[in-house]
Each structure stands twice: as structure tokens, then as C-alpha cells.
Image: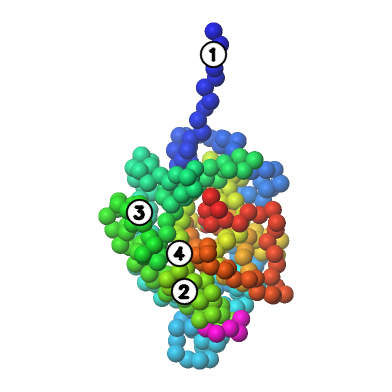
Amino acid sequence: MRVEATPVPVPLRVESLAGSGIVTIPAQYIRPEEERATLGDALDAAKNLDAGPQIPTVDLAGFLSGDEETRRRCVEAVQEAASNWGVMHIVNHGIPLELIKRMQEAGEKFFSLPIEEKERYANDQSSGNIQGYGSKLANNASGQLEWQDYFFHLVYPEGKANYSMWPKEPANYIEETQEFARQLRAVTSNMLAMLSLGLKLDEGKLEEEVGGLSDLLLQMKINYYPRCPQPDLAVGVEAHTDVSALSFILHNMVPGLQVYYEGKWVTARCILSNGKYKSILHRGLVNKEKIRISWAVFCEPPREKIVLKPYPSSSGRAPRPSSPSHLCPAH
Ligand SMILES: O=C(O)CCC(=O)C(=O)O
Ligand SMILES: [Fe+2]
């Protein structure tokens, strides 16, 4: 009798794989050799933060102040960071830290639920719907996977959000995330205003171009990176540029994010926002010890809108053609 070999199912969730006690990771997660040469444990990478160039920090308090000169200097700082780096840490953005904390705790609580509970929110990527709980599907020839599960949802405008698929547990998830989105939308307007002024455009120009309050979509992706037994072989998120007009990233203070600057990977420290002027190549490392969670919010003009043309700029280094652009696994 011929016995058919039963294909071994690849565990769908990285969390279950990580929790299974494996000491070596499956082949699909192992990056090509030339990429591996630049990988490592994120916690080690974060030990050398003081060496080399660092992502600029911009204090937005200046823009929110009434003083013309202070505002002008703030616009200049944003313009400089956005053109030179395409990424910056922002401080004094106006969102209360208590709210950020509550929103993050709610997301952490959701991810601490048993996988079976989270599966109730599983997305259906095959039907093209990536809203919900998911993990990357091997959709390219190499079959490469990332060490990450995620929860993806549109959070603003509220009229376009589908709250019925947002986590019901913890009970305050919707309320905190909704309020955070509202406040982040205000920060988005301020960033767009500064970026406009930095380009010598009218303050409201970029806001209008990306769809304004009614049409610009804020999509939140909570990235959950479990501990990885071989962080020098895998990535949490592969090198890519976001296709959004602007992205904001927060994380649970576990390092992992790196940006590609002047030929080197620079490890990020804290909160940052990715400017429109230049779309920086970035990736996420994983580590052996700590679960990392990040909240990426992509500000995306509606598809039917004409997307901004690239602004002619001498500093606009094009991303490497080999790096995928994505918002999420399906993009
Ligand atoms: O986890 C991070 O810090 C980065 C995530 C990211 O780049 C993305 O989701 O597009
Ligand atoms: Fe990204």
C-alpha cells in the first residue's frame, strides 16, 4: 500500500511557533546569506546606539506656540529632517502620554489573549481583506516569512472604521484606540502643515492633496514580534519603504526598528514619524529575550485620489529597487 506523506502544516502564527520551544527556526524565516550578514539580536544592536549618525529629534512644541519665529524654526527642523532622513523622532506632539499608555496597554492585553481568542478576528487574506488578525503569507517566489503576527485596522475617519471587527477584549480597546486615532489625526494635520510650509507651499496644501479630514485614511497595524531563538537569521519586518504619505510608529520600548541611512542600518530609539519628503528604507530586527510590539499608523490617501507627485529634490535618494514597498503583507 502506498502511503501518502502528509504535508506538515506550517504553523500559521509566529506566536505559536515561538511558544513551541523550538531552538532553530523553520527555513522560510531564514533570510538570504547576504542579508544575514547585517542582522543580529536587536538588543545587541541597541547597545551601540551612541556610535554613528542618529535619527533627528524634532520638538513640535515650537509649531504649536504662537510665536512666529519659533514656528519658523520648527518648520525648518521638520523640513531638514524630512529631506535629509525621511524619518524623525517627534516630541511634544500634543498627545497625552497617559492616552498613549492606555492605548498601548489595550493592544498588549489583546495580544496576551490565547491565540484561539485572537483567531476570532483572523483576516481572510485570500479574499483580499487584510483587516484583522493575521500573519504574513508567503506570497512571493522565495516563500520568505517574517517573524511577526499583526492586527490591522482602519482607525480614521471614524465613519469608515469597522468597529465590529475591532477587539472586544479588553473592554476599553475601542475607546482608547479611537481616542488615540482622533488625536493622532490632529498631529497628522500639524505635520502636513509643517511639511507644506517647508516646501514653501500654503499651510493646508498637503492636507488637501492627501484627502483632508474626510478622506485621508489612517490604518493602524499593531506588529507583534515574539521572541526569536535565532534573531541573527530572521527579521521581524523585512527592509521596505511604506507607501503611505506619512507613517507614525510607536513601540513598547523594546528596540528593533532600523532605518537605512548613508549605506548603514541605524537603530532607532523611540517614537518617530516618517516624513513624506523621502521614503526611508526600514526594517525590524527581532531578539531572543523580549516580545516587541509596535503600532504603525499609515496615513494613506484614498486610492481614487491622485497621489502626490514626487517633489523634485536634490536630496531625494530613491529607495533601492529591490526593497518592497508595503503597508502590510498584502500591499
Ligand atoms: O515595528 C516597527 O518598528 C516597524 C514596522 C513597520 O515598518 C511597518 O509595519 O511598516
Ligand atoms: Fe514600515
Question: Residue furthest toward the front?
Answer: 304
Q: Which of marks 1 and 3 is nearer the N terminus?
A: 1
Residue 94: x, y in percent? 41, 76
Residue 201 counted in the magenta span = yes
Provide residue 122's location: percent of width, then percent of height. Answer: 40, 44
Report whether residue 101 is seen.
no
Mark 2 vs mark 3: which is more N-terminal? 3
Query: Which numbered disc covers residue 212?
Result: 2
Q: Which of marks 4 and 3 is nearer the N terminus?
A: 3
Q: Please report contact status of discs 2 and 4: CB closer than 8 Å, yes or no.
A: no
- The residue that mark 4 highlights is 218
Look at label 3 and name its amino acid.
Trp
Label 2 or label 4, whichever lies nearer to me, is: 2
Amino acid type indicated by mark 4: Leu
Q: In which quarter of the image is the N terminus?
A: top right
Cα separation, mark 1 vs mark 3, equals 44 Å
In the picture of the structure, the residue carrying the numbered disc 1 is 3
> Alpha-carbon distance for marks 4 and 3?
15 Å
The answer to whether 10 appears left or right of 171 in the picture is right
What number is the disc on residue 18? none
